[in-house]
Image (cartoon, rainbow, N blue to C red):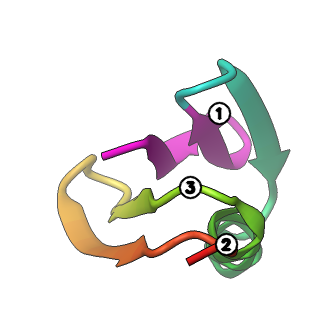
Amino acid sequence: MSGLVDVVPCEGGWCVRVHDTGEVLRFTGGGEAERRARRLAAESERPVEVRIHDRGGRLVGRWITDGAAA
């Protein structure tokens, strides 16, 4: 797997963690965070796995993109 993005609960809302860069994006709503994670993955030239976690930290969804160049 080339890339990994997690949507996780964080203080004050939800975070999108981009593992390749260490970047953390913060959002007030989980839906907004998930949409941003999907967009980041779709725009990547490499395959990306997106993992969605609930407020308890449990994995509740995941998908893998092929990368924009594929």
Give the percent coordinates (x, y) of residue 53.
34, 59
Residue 46, numbered circle: 3
Residue 66 falls inside the magenta stretch: no
Residue at disc 1, secondary structure: loop
Residue at disc 3, secondary structure: loop
First-in-chain label (3 vs 1): 1
Mark 3 crowdedness (10 Å alpha carbons): few <14, some 14-19, many ≥20: some
Position of the C terminus by quadrant: bottom right
Q: Nearer the viewer, residue 24 or 40?
A: 40
Would you say 18 lies left or right of 5 here? right
User: Looking at the image, is mark 3 or mark 1 nearer the viewer?
Assistant: 3
- Please name the residue that numbered disc 1 is placed on: 11
The magenta region covers: 1-18
Dominant SS of magenta comes to strand
Give the percent coordinates (x, y) of residue 61.
27, 76
The residue lying at 59 percent from left, 37 percent from top is 17
- Please name the residue that numbered disc 2 is placed on: 69
Image quadrant assignment for residue 12: top right
Residue at disc 2, secondary structure: loop
Give the percent coordinates (x, y) of residue 16.
64, 47
Q: Nearer the viewer, residue 15 or 47?
A: 47
**CA–CA distance in space, label 2 to label 3:** 7 Å
For the residues bearing labels 2 and 3, Cβ distance under 8 angstroms: yes
First-in-chain label (2 vs 1): 1
Seen in the picture, residue 44 relative to 63 is either above or below; the reply is above
User: Looking at the image, is mark 2 or mark 3 nearer the viewer?
Assistant: 2
Instruction: Name the residue at the top extreme.
Output: 22
The residue lying at 81 percent from left, 55 percent from top is 27
Q: Nearer the viewer, residue 31 or 62?
A: 62
**CA–CA distance in space, label 3 to label 1:** 30 Å
Image quadrant assignment for residue 60: bottom left
